[in-house]
């Protein structure tokens, strides 16, 4: 077997971040090489360099022994490298064949399209994959799995020798995954090398030959998939030291249960999720991307519909159909995407703080008390330490950490005592992170109920009094917070695909 | 209260912060340049009577443009302002001429009908999630048809209602200052604009208008009933179109059921020239007023210079494209 791809000493810098630090990776022909690591470990960045989306800042990239530097995705395609992104990039209203040959359709004279050749060539590719699919099918009518096959066919139509698959099974069910694996094995036998990015441990054992582990932009090691226990791979992934001071879990015996969720369900995204949180408690929600944590939060908050489930606030059953109902019940939600769902970025700090509580500042005919709004905004600016020149500064001009504090101020003003934080420190630098952590702890001490969703395990372990772990829409367990729970324990539950519930409840 | 926050609240017409300030300045400068240019080109242009004619021509378009501004700031669009104006004029005609009701009742009926139609558009957009362009396009056609049906395709005259034509043509200011015979229609435009500006900058409704255009999902996730507020804004815009209906009916002393199409485009053009962003979240009433004046000055000035009607239209179109291009350049710069 010859080396199709050889990457050594790859460096990549983004403004303020050393994203890849002398990373190495290689791929043999006819091999499935899994690339593992937590979110943000640098897997996608490395693959974007291989596929010409980013350019490396240092190191060597060889394809078939030749050093190359693809500067665009199409140059990488010419070198035989195809990538299938996590989010499919197909045009739903076009046919399968039109999608596969978009931008390089076979033509007849005067620029007329040669639909016959188009469909014939597509049928040929499908035959080589042993895939039964009519080239004239509209892509939008296919299942996600079939659409994935179309993406693979598209990559193969470039005569790719290297196929990069970024979380290909994220949206697939078990039968569809089996179907995908059949195709992967056939490609393998034809000598195609496959880079397989996935978070799902059990898939590795089924499909991968070797596993390269990355962490914090660095290469950790490469191991044989068959001989290496999953626990070893997990500890390679999370091996970083937790430098924060140990968390002290307060004694909450006797504290009132402020939020109780039971049987929350919606399709495959949320499957029978039940839990409760006490006054003064911080409940962490851990899990890998797509585990359904955000979906649970949005369903509780009424931002999305739910199919089943009961929510009790302070022991009272409440019916939450819209965010407005949730706010009435005292629940606030701080979205992971502040810019899209948290802030009116074109408006100023004062208006954003008051956004959920305009009724506090208006007369019966709806005239605003701007002086009162300014006073309130200034109170929160000093209380939360929001760094802004004035309360009339547009929020889009603030840093991520300060924007987050504006959103927190909005909910504190609304007097919500149950606050759901979805990725509260995403896009926030390290210094501001610990400020946000302190703020969350103070809120809990003040008797608020806090739910924190985070994909960063150190963050979850730093904050949570208890840790709920989800995998594929199911709550796979609730672990106690503090030093008795390891990152490995959490990862175990987060990758536990089969429905074995062993809930280690610690509620008194 | 700190002094720093007072700075932004100099004028009730300044709307929200300094958004669109540059574009507004640009629009104002263009207006001045146009005025100077036309006065040099033709001695007839700067006559008081001609200035009054320009203002009079602005009054109806200006009122409709104010209504369109409200909807556009939410991130929507209202194509029905023109035919809604006509519909409200016809309603006034029915109440005053056919039913012989008193003047005030006719005015109230027109404004009420406008608000009700606006509420309908608002319901289509907010509750039924029909895109504003389509919802108001439908309303535009429905109202045009209804105006013809109700009036029997004939104009309704207001000869039995003494004083009706004075609503627009009379001049309260002229009675006090005979040197300044500014028609009441213009006065009403400025009152409507001042009220709309007050609502935008000083009330909950106004703040949500900007917030909806800025980020509707964030507003919804703040627990605000966005649908209800959106319907209110469309209803308010409809009511203002009702005032426009009274103005045009009073000026013509009749309700002309075939009129109305094309007014919506003039209104949108004025809004855009005035620096209000079609993507929502930004805009001012003052800018819209300037935009409406620019349109009126252009039309009037080109006519005074005896430029052919068809070329006037071409020039107007070019001005709109230029204005939006200026807005795009500004947005790119401010990121």
Image (cartoon, coloured by chain):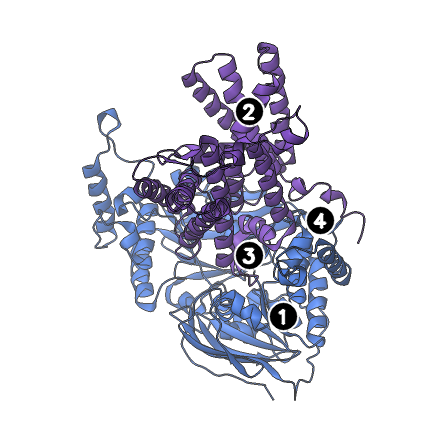
Chain colours: A blue, B purple
Q: Residues within 10 Å of mark 4 (few under 14, many from 20)?
A: some
Q: Is residue A175 left or right of residue A201?
A: left
Instruction: Residue under label 1, please give it.
Output: A416
Nearest to the observer: residue B48 or residue B116: B48
Q: Do the numbered discs 4 and 2 sit on residues whose CB atoms are within 8 Å?
A: no
Q: How many angstroms separate mark 3 from mark 2 (CA)?
A: 43 Å
Secondary structure beneath disc 4?
Answer: loop
Which quadrant holds residue A209? bottom left
Reading the chain from its start, which is encountered first: label 4 or label 1?
4
Q: Residues within 10 Å of mark 3 (few under 14, many from 20)?
A: many
Which chain does tag 4 point to?
A
Reply above or below: B327 against A422: above
At 70% from the left edge and 48% from the top edge, which residue is drawn? A393
Q: Position of residue A112 (x, y in %)?
A: 24, 30
Instruction: Residue under label 4, please give it.
Output: A392
Are both tags, 4 and 1, on one chain? yes
Which chain does tag 3 point to?
B
Are both tags, 4 and 3, on one chain? no
Instruction: Residue under label 2, please give it.
Output: B54
């Amino acid at each position: 077997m010859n080396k199709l791809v050889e990457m050594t000493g790859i460096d990549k810098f983004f403004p303020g971040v050393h994203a890849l630090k002398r990373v190495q990776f290689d791929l043999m022909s006819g091999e499935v090489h899994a690339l593992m690591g937590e979110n943000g470990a640098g897997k996608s960045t490395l693959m974007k360099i291989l596929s010409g989306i980013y350019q490396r800042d240092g190191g060597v990239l060889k394809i078939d022994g030749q050093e190359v530097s693809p500067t665009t995705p199409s140059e990488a395609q010419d070198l035989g490298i195809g990538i299938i992104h996590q989010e499919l990039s197909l045009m739903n209203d076009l046919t399968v064949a039109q999608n596969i040959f978009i931008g390089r359709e076979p033509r007849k004279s005067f620029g007329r399209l040669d639909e016959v050749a188009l469909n014939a060539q597509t049928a040929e590719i499908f035959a080589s994959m042993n895939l039964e699919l009519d080239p004239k099918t509209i892509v939008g009518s296919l299942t996600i799995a079939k659409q994935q096959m179309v993406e693979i066919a598209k990559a193969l139509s470039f005569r790719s020798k290297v196929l990069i698959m970024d979380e290909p099974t994220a949206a697939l069910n078990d039968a569809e995954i089996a179907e995908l694996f059949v195709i992967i094995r056939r490609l393998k036998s034809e000598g195609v090398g496959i880079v397989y990015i996935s978070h799902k441990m059990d898939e590795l054992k089924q499909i991968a030959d070797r596993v390269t582990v990355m962490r914090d932009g660095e290469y950790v090691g490469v191991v044989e998939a068959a001989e290496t226990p999953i626990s070893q791979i997990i500890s390679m992934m999370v091996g970083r030291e937790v430098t924060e001071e140990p968390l002290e879990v307060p004694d909450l015996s006797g504290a009132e249960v402020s939020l109780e969720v039971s049987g929350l369900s919606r399709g495959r995204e949320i499957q029978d999720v039940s839990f409760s949180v006490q006054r003064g408690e911080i409940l962490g929600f851990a899990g890998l991307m797509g585990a359904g944590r955000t979906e649970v939060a949005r369903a509780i908050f009424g931002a999305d519909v739910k199919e089943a489930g009961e929510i009790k606030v302070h022991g009272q059953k409440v019916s939450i159909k819209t965010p407005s109902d949730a706010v009435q019940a005292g629940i606030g939600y701080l979205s992971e995407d502040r810019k899209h769902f948290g802030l009116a970025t074109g408006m100023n700090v004062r208006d954003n703080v008051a956004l959920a509580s305009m009724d506090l500042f208006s007369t019966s005919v709806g005239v605003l008390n701007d002086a009162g709004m300014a006073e309130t905004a200034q109170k929160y600016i000093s209380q939360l330490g929001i760094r802004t020149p004035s309360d009339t500064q547009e929020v889009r001009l603030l840093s991520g950490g300060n924007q987050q504090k504006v959103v927190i101020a909005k909910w504190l003003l609304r007097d919500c005592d149950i606050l759901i934080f979805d990725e509260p420190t995403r896009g926030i630098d390290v210094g501001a992170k610990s400020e946000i952590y302190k703020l969350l702890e103070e809120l809990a001490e003040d008797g608020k109920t806090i739910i924190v969703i985070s994909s960063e395990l150190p963050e979850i372990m730093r904050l949570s009094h208890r840790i709920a772990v989800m995998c594929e829409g199911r709550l796979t367990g609730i672990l106690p917070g503090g030093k008795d729970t390891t990152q490995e324990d959490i990862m175990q539950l987060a990758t536990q695909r089969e429905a074995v519930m062993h809930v280690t409840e610690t509620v008194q | 209260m700190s002094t720093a926050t007072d700075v932004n609240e100099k004028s009730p017409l300044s709307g929200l912060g300094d958004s669109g300030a540059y574009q507004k300045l640009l629009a104002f400068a263009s207006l001045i340049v146009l005025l100077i240019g036309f006065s040099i080109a033709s001695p007839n242009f700067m006559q008081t009577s001609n200035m009054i004619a320009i203002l009079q021509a602005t009054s109806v378009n200006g009122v409709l443009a104010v209504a369109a501004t409200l909807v556009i700031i939410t991130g929507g669009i209202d194509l029905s302002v023109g035919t809604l104006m006509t519909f409200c004029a016809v309603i006034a005609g029915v109440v005053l001429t056919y039913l012989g009701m008193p003047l005030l009742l006719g005015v109230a009926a027109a404004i009420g009908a406008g608000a009700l139609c606006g509420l309908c558009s608002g319901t289509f957009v907010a509750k039924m999630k029909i895109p504003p362009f389509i919802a108001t396009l439908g309303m535009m056609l429905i109202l045009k048809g209804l105006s013809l049906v109700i009036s029997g395709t004939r104009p309704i005259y207001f000869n039995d209602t003494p004083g009706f034509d004075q609503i627009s043509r009379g001049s309260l200011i002229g009675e006090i200052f005979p040197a300044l015979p500014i028609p009441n229609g213009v006065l009403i435009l400025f009152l409507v604009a001042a009220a709309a500006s007050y609502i935008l900058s000083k009330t909950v409704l106004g703040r949500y208008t900007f917030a909806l255009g800025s980020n509707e999902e964030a507003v919804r996730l703040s627990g605000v009933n966005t649908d209800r507020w959106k319907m209110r804004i469309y209803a308010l815009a409809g009511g203002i179109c009702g005032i426009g209906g009274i103005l045009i009916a009073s000026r013509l002393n009749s309700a002309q059921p075939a009129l109305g199409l094309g007014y919506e485009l003039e209104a949108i053009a004025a809004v855009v020239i005035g620096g209000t962003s079609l993507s929502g979240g930004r805009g001012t009433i003052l800018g819209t007023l300037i935009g409406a004046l620019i349109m009126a000055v252009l039309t009037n000035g080109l006519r005074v210079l005896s430029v052919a009607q068809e070329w006037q239209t071409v020039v107007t179109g070019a001005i709109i494209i230029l204005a939006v291009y200026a807005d795009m350049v500004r947005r790119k710069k401010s990121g």
